[in-house]
Image (spheres, helix red, strand yellow):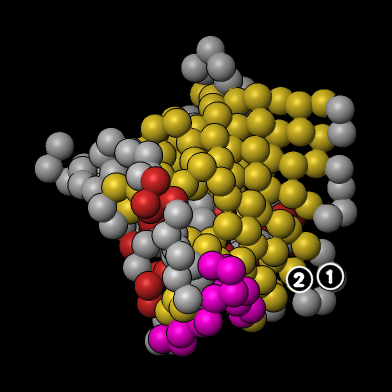
């Protein structure tokens, strides 16, 4: 596959990498390891949605193009696709294959419903988002750095591992409502310029719920463009 580079096969960190200690880290160094610097394909991810004492397990596939386009496929454990979701910089399309419905709307829906904008979506997979031209150097304490940023009405609190140069946790806070989302990242793996967290946990501060994502297979690059075919004769529903 000519477009697959870097993370075609993920390798576990060596002991030296895992124990690396840094006294400082720059924003540029952290951004250099962002997954969304490239096209990528999360081929298989196990997703566990937990609400109170109940949980639902499913499988996910996420494709990304550098044009800020995401294609998400959600399947049950037998492999049957329940939903296909296309997210661009300004729109959302959802094929609900089970109920034969096509949901559509602007990306404002993500902010209203889930408290996250499309600009912040890379944070979900552990990417560092901040001013593009900011080359600040942060001093580290016990190999950690804490960074705060304001992006689109959201206050972002990053905790950075200075050795890995990756986010280990982040809190996204809505400055108006006070709602918070906390995301934690574990089980880092690195190969060349690519470094990802294979375990991601997303928590809300208002409800007893969390989403656990375990990435099992991943590669950089996409051979083909992302395409989304709306379901034929599906009922169309506007996302508000």
Q: Residues within 10 Å of mark 1 (few under 14, many from 20)?
A: few
- Asked whether the viewer can see residue 238, the reply is no
Q: Tell me whether circle 1 and circle 2 mark residues in contact (CB < 8 Å).
A: yes
The residue to which callout 2 is attached is: 174
Q: Magenta includes 139?
A: yes
The residue depicted at 26 percent of the width and 39 percent of the height is 8
Give x and y (percent) for residue 96: 59, 32
Give x and y (percent) for residue 175: 78, 77
Give x and y (percent) for residue 130: 51, 77
Q: Is residue 80 above or below residue 41?
A: above
Residue 210, by quadrant, is top right
Q: Which mark is residue 35?
A: none
The secondary element bearing badge 2 is classed as strand
Q: Tell me the magenta residue range.
A: 135-149
The residue depicted at 37 percent of the width and 39 percent of the height is 12
Helix, strand or loop for the magenta stretch, by majority: strand
The residue depicted at 87 percent of the width and 47 percent of the height is 207
Q: Is residue 162 above or below residue 104?
A: below
Q: Is residue 228 above or below residue 117?
A: above
Q: In this rendering, would 40 be left or right of 238?
A: left
Q: Nearer the viewer, residue 25 or 97?
A: 25
CA separation in Å, label 1 and label 2: 5 Å
Q: Nearer the viewer, residue 35 or 185?
A: 185
Give x and y (percent) for residue 141: 59, 74
Q: Residues within 10 Å of mark 2 (few under 14, many from 20)?
A: many
On-image quarter of the N terminus: top left
Q: In this rendering, would 79 be left or right of 220?
A: right
Q: Which mark is residue 178?
A: 1
Q: Magenta includes 83?
A: no
On-image quarter of the C terminus: bottom right
- Asked whether the viewer can see residue 125, the reply is yes
């Amino acid at each position: 596959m000519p477009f697959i580079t870097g993370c075609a096969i993920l390798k576990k960190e060596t002991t030296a990498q895992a124990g690396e200690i840094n006294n400082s880290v720059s924003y540029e160094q952290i951004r250099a390891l962002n997954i969304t610097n490239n096209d990528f394909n999360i081929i298989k991810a196990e997703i566990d949605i937990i609400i109170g004492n109940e949980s639902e397990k499913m499988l996910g596939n996420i494709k990304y193009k550098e044009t800020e386009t995401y294609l998400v496929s959600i399947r049950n454990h037998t492999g049957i696709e329940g939903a296909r979701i296309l997210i661009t910089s300004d729109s959302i399309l959802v094929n609900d294959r089970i109920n034969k419905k096509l949901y559509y709307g602007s990306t404002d829906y993500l902010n209203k419903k889930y408290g996250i904008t499309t600009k912040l979506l890379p944070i979900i997979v552990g990417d560092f988002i901040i001013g593009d031209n900011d080359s600040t150097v942060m001093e580290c304490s016990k190999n950690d750095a804490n960074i705060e940023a304001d992006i689109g009405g959201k206050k972002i609190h990053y905790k950075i591992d200075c050795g890995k140069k990756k986010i280990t946790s982040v809190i996204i806070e809505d400055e108006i409502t006070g709602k918070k989302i906390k995301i934690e990242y574990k089980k880092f793996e690195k190969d060349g310029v690519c470094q990802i967290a294979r375990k991601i946990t997303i928590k809300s501060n208002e409800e007893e719920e969390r989403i656990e994502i375990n990435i099992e297979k991943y590669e950089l690059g996409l051979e083909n463009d992302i395409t989304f075919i709306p379901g034929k004769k599906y009922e169309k529903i506007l996302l508000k």
